[in-house]
Image: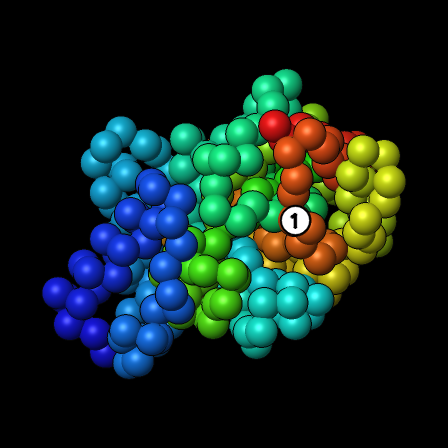
Amino acid sequence: MLTDEDLRTVAARLARAERERLPVEPLGAAFPGIDAADAYRVQLVNVHARLAAGATVVGHKVGLSSPVMQRMMGVAEPDYGHLLDDMRLDPATPVDTTAYCAPRIEVEIGFVLGADLPGAGCTTADVLAATDHVVPAVELIDSRIADWRIGIADTIADNASSAGFATGPGADPRGLDLTAIDARLREDGAVVAEGRGDAVLGDPAAAVAWLARTVDRFGVRLRRGHLILPGSCTRAVDVAPGRTYTAEFDGLGSVSLTFR
């Protein structure tokens, strides 16, 4: 376990890397004892700093919830991070790629909660009952760790590699089989990644339930009005300036982001 001073040092390095867009070496190089518990504490240091500066929490995300993403990132378990209001991206406004270190885009079925979720013991049924609507979503991920050379502690400390998100119009989840929704990511019209809802822990609602149970251990609840991103249906794709990326979901809709 890292000391409080070490935790503050790690948090400051990641905050500076994000602010200056200068990635740092994997955290274990300087702090070989860092583990997942330490990393969540680091994440909270930087989240609390952003809240103190005026940001607000608008939801949470599950990361690395599909086998394809776990293989891609070289980890063996999901993680989670916070979604803040200053991370929301407008599909009508091109995104500046120079504001990030090494941005990638993911395809997700987002859950907008109409009621608070229980913590310990939360089930998939609880999630569906509490969800007001589901939305087509994309998450922009970015790593403040050089060359995406991340382990589980690196990505957790780095707010689960989260950087931004955008959503489209929603639908009632009770009229959809979320496990069977086919999803595609297009780059300027060409399909560059494909997947299905059940790639996310077998059911994206199960990933939301996992998140509710997990954050409960830290005294956190998933609240009414929050957006929950359960994890990507497809592999992540590097974004390039001048390109438009569109996430399409059969029966749910689509959302696009253009990068400059």
- Residue tagged by mark 1? 238
Q: Report the number of numbered marks.
A: 1
**Picture coordinates of residue 91, whole percent (x, y):** 63, 24
Crowding near pointer 1: few (<14 within 10 Å), some, many (20+)? Answer: few
Q: Is residue 4 left or right of residue 143?
A: left
Residue found at the far top of this picture: 92
Residue type, numbered disc 1? Asp
The residue positioned 28% from the left and 39% from the top of the image is: 50
Relative depth, front residue between 221 and 7: 7
Q: Quadrant of residue 4?
A: bottom left
Relative depth, front residue between 177 and 63: 63
Q: The C terminus lies in which quarter of the figure?
A: top right
Q: Is residue 61 left or right of residue 3?
A: right
Residue found at the far left of this picture: 5
In this rendering, the answer to whether 193 lies above or below 242 is: below
How was the colour assigned to the protein in this rendering?
A: rainbow
